Image (cartoon, coloured by chain):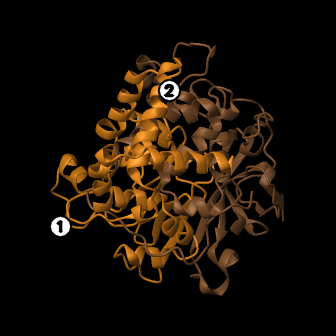
Chain colours: A brown, B orange
């Protein structure tokens, strides 16, 4: 979707503000949100692309006003309700509704180390032919889906070159909406900075984006 | 859904108590992004309530939450990446493996996993400077750098890194000569990027361990170089 999250190339966002000796979490609740999202993700009711899309659905003005973990929390609440794991009434009251099933956590303490150590790989060992190869000129599609996509606006319609084939990966545009993993090749694509931004960019600079087959067309 | 969010925040405001003002002043003391933040005390209360609800419903295990937080607060951070970089500086064969099969080479030092499932290490040189960003969200190589700092996830960095990387670097105090090629890596897929910075001049005598102590998080994101003296202390 053409949302506020897709902010590459925007102006007016102000100076970057690094913080000395920054803590991992600035308040206890931030860490709890971080951990709760992962623990609830273990129920398998959504995937990483769904959860990214849910954050993209935070209305633009709120998105910019909220801190990072506030956005995560807002999207998390939506996921909890949409997945059916928690009712809106339960969130409002803070109490389980009458007759709601009492379950046993799936993400138990013994599952923490394996999750951290293995993660959730999105490369797939399935035989899918690549549509492009290293060294080939390509153009990013001029597409504007209302759903989730990882093709930023600033690259759409721009020409670049395939640098490397990363192999076959889950396709986020379908996976986010439970329309299947549609595994396909993803590539490292180099775009000259001047192709993206015109003459104001330095002549030899470039931006590399990782792009799936469905984002690209031959030049 | 918007309504729910507003309800959520307004309910939180109503529930906020004077007892939480200590937490509020803590947040205000932080010199960054918090001017955009809603009253933190509300969030403290609401997240506590949410956690209790999920525990009561049997959906989460508190011990697992604690362990996960402890892992990213105390066990996984930029010291991991610094060891990878230092090893690459002292061992040319390791460096070669790191650049060609990043995951396997990083795993040799015992690192890998969540949000680093698919890694690519990119090398700085006198001719090339690499910079990593995620314009769409906050993708970052957790196993080697830990969780990202607020500035990395912020709108100013995400918006400008791709259109004006040299301006962004200048803001971090790094002025690059015109003839250096800047390569920006936008983390749009599940690839995670780690910058292999240049080894600082005059570091020949240093041990691998001493070298690792010089390597900062910022240098591995590409917003700084590694220098012999880290006056401000490593971050």
Q: Is residue B164 left or right of residue A84?
A: left
Residues behind callouts 2 and 1 on a single chain: yes
Circle nearer the viewer, 2 or 1: 2
Q: Mark 2, chain letter?
A: B
Q: Is residue B113 visible?
A: no
Residue A92 lies, in percent from the top left, at 57, 36
Helix, strand, or loop for circle 1?
loop
Q: Mark 1, chain letter?
A: B
Residue B33 lies, in percent from the top left, at 41, 63
Q: Is residue A154 left or right of residue B133?
A: right
Q: Quadrant of the C terminus of chain A?
A: bottom right
Q: Which residue is mark 1?
A: B231
Helix, strand, or loop for circle 2?
helix
Q: Which residue is mark 2?
A: B53
Question: Foreground residue, A160 or A9?
Answer: A9
Q: As displayed, is residue B179 above or below residue B75?
A: below
Q: Quadrant of the N terminus of chain A?
A: bottom right
The numbered mark, 2 or 1, whose residue comes first in the sequence reads 2
Q: Residue at x 17, y 67 (%)?
A: B231
Count residues near mark 1 (Cα–Cα under 10 Å), then give few for <14, some for 14-19, many for 20+.
Answer: few
Q: Residue at x 84, y 58 (%)?
A: A217
Residue B10 lies, in percent from the top left, at 53, 50
């Amino acid at each position: 979707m053409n949302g506020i999250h897709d902010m590459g190339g925007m102006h007016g966002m102000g100076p970057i503000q690094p913080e000395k000796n920054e803590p991992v979490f600035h308040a206890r609740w931030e860490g709890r949100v971080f951990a709760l999202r992962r623990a609830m993700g273990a129920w398998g009711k959504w995937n990483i692309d769904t959860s990214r899309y849910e954050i993209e659905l935070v209305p633009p003005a709120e998105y910019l006003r909220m801190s990072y973990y506030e956005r995560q929390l807002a999207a998390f609440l939506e996921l909890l309700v949409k997945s059916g794991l928690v009712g809106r009434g339960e969130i409002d009251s803070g109490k389980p509704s009458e007759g709601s099933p009492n379950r046993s956590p799936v993400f138990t303490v013994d599952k923490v180390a394996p999750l951290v150590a293995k993660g959730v790989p999105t490369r797939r060992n399935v035989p899918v032919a690549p549509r492009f190869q290293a060294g080939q000129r390509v153009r990013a599609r001029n597409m504007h889906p209302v759903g989730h996509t990882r093709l930023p606006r600033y690259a759409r319609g721009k020409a670049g070159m395939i640098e490397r084939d990363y192999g076959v990966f889950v396709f986020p545009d379908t996976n986010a909406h439970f329309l299947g993993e549609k595994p396909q090749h993803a590539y490292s694509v180099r775009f000259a900075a001047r192709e993206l931004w015109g003459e104001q960019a330095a002549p030899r600079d470039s931006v590399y984006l990782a792009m799936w087959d469905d984002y690209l067309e031959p030049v | 859904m918007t309504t729910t969010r507003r309800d959520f925040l307004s309910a939180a405001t109503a529930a906020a108590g004077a007892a939480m003002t200590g937490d509020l002043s803590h947040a205000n003391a932080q010199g960054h992004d918090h001017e955009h933040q809603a009253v933190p005390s509300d969030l403290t209360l609401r997240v506590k309530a949410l956690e209790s609800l999920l525990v009561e419903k049997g959906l989460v295990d508190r011990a697992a939450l604690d362990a996960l937080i402890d892992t990213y607060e105390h066990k996984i951070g930029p010291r991991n990446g610094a060891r990878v970089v230092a090893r690459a500086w002292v061992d040319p064969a390791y460096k070669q493996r790191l650049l060609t099969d990043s995951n396997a080479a990083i795993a040799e030092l015992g690192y890998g996993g969540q949000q680093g499932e698919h890694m690519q290490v990119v090398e700085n040189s006198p001719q090339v400077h690499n910079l990593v960003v995620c314009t769409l969200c906050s993708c970052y190589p957790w196993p080697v750098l830990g969780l990202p700092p607020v500035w990395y996830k912020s709108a100013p960095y995400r918006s400008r890194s791709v259109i004006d990387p040299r301006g962004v670097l200048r803001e971090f105090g790094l002025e690059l000569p015109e003839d250096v090629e800047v390569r920006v890596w936008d983390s749009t897929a599940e690839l995670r990027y780690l910058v292999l910075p240049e080894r600082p001049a005059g570091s020949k005598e240093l041990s691998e361990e001493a070298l690792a102590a010089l390597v900062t998080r910022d240098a591995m994101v590409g917003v700084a170089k590694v220098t012999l003296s880290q006056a401000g202390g490593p971050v």
